[in-house]
Image: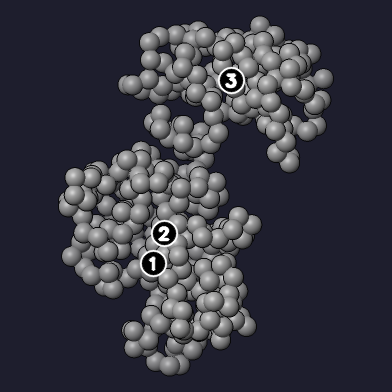
Amino acid sequence: MHVEVRGLNKHFGNFHAVKDVSFDIQTGHLIGLLGPSGGGKTSILRILAGLEQPDAGEIHFHGKRVNELAPQERGIGFVFQNYALFKHMSVYDNIAFGLKVKKSSKTHIKEKVAELVELTGLKGFEHRYPHQLSGGQRQRVAFARALAPEPQLLLLDEPFAAIDAKIRQELRTWLRELIERVGITSIFVTHDQDEAIEVADEIMVINQGRLEQKGTPWDIYKKPGTPFVASFIGESTVIEQAGSLRGFEEAAGVGTRALIRPEYIDVGPSEEFALLSATEEGIVKHLHFRGSEWMVEVQVGDQRLITYRSLEKSTLEPGQQVRVLVHRAYLYNEESSWMVENRLKEDPMPIII
């Protein structure tokens, strides 16, 4: 299903929850609605589902306006974060529920449920009840139940929020593969950027009711369109006066700040760098072991920067004096934002001894 939304607005009393939001979603794409809590993500999802009516705006599915259609007439499957399974029904009956409402034949119901049980990895659990399942299994039942009536659009409201971290990681991969196999247009709400980046074809970043940016995870990470997106996506450090950094003097000016991601920074002893004139003096403040690498907090003047260091390199120590090379920075002020390279850097990477 191709989805078009134009000028969507929604108020709850005096609170403006959705502010002039417009977007298009291509058929078969998996879209992540990403943003902080209370930003308007779930309101947009509920409006698409017909569970809330917009104050203004147009919603079209495959070119057809659906604003006035009831939820059951929109061809939508909805997965809630708390599963919303029928506790008194078995796995089989939960999955079959929508088909029974549509008055499908018993033969079709049996075949469809068997297909979805196989697809979602629930074979052997058909006669169990929700309280006899793990959180991950209950969420798989919720997915199967939503897919059973063969909707054209699947909406998921923080589908992994109630599941522990290890199972959540497994279900991300499973969901990505499931959507690819089924080929259904899907939109899921999340405040977890790792989840959105890993699962979604495209991300829509929502903040204070507005659509800040829409694009692939890679584009949004590498080319953030607004200061909010830059600060919200990925780990980063904000420098209030960008012109204080060596190689970025042209950024000096009122209101110009720099957002620097860890991968934009190299830190180490002086012998690792071919061009010391492009580096800063720094002191290692803290080291955090991250399994595959070290996260290093380093003090440069009155600024605290965060970067990563490979386990293959020599181990740094708290209090050690080091050199710090900032390769690039994302600069922004009230009017605009742009990416700038360190003008003193001739070699793109330090020479490792």
* Secondary element at tag 2: strand
Where does the image place residue 337, in percent across and percent down from the top left?
40, 23
Disc 3 target residue: 304
Q: Which mark is residue 157?
A: 2
Q: Amino acid at mark 2?
A: Asp
Q: Amino acid at mark 1?
A: Phe
Q: CA distance from mark 1 to mark 2?
A: 8 Å
The quarter holding residue 274 reads top right
**345 or 228: nearer the viewer:** 228
Q: CA distance from mark 3 to mark 1?
A: 44 Å
Where does the image place residue 250, in percent across and percent down from the top left?
47, 8
The residue shown at (64%, 11%) is 280
Say whether marks 3 and 1 touch (CB < 8 Å). Answer: no
Q: Is residue 208 left or right of residue 231?
A: left
Disc 1 target residue: 78
Q: Nearer the viewer, mark 3 or mark 1?
A: 3
* Secondary element at tag 1: strand
Q: Is residue 80 left or right of residue 278?
A: left
Q: Is residue 266 left or right of residue 10?
A: right
Mark 2 neighbour density, 10 Å: few (under 14) some (14–19) many (20 or more): many
**103 or 315: nearer the viewer:** 315
* Secondary element at tag 3: strand
Quarter of the picture holding the N terminus: bottom left
The quarter holding residue 68 reads bottom left
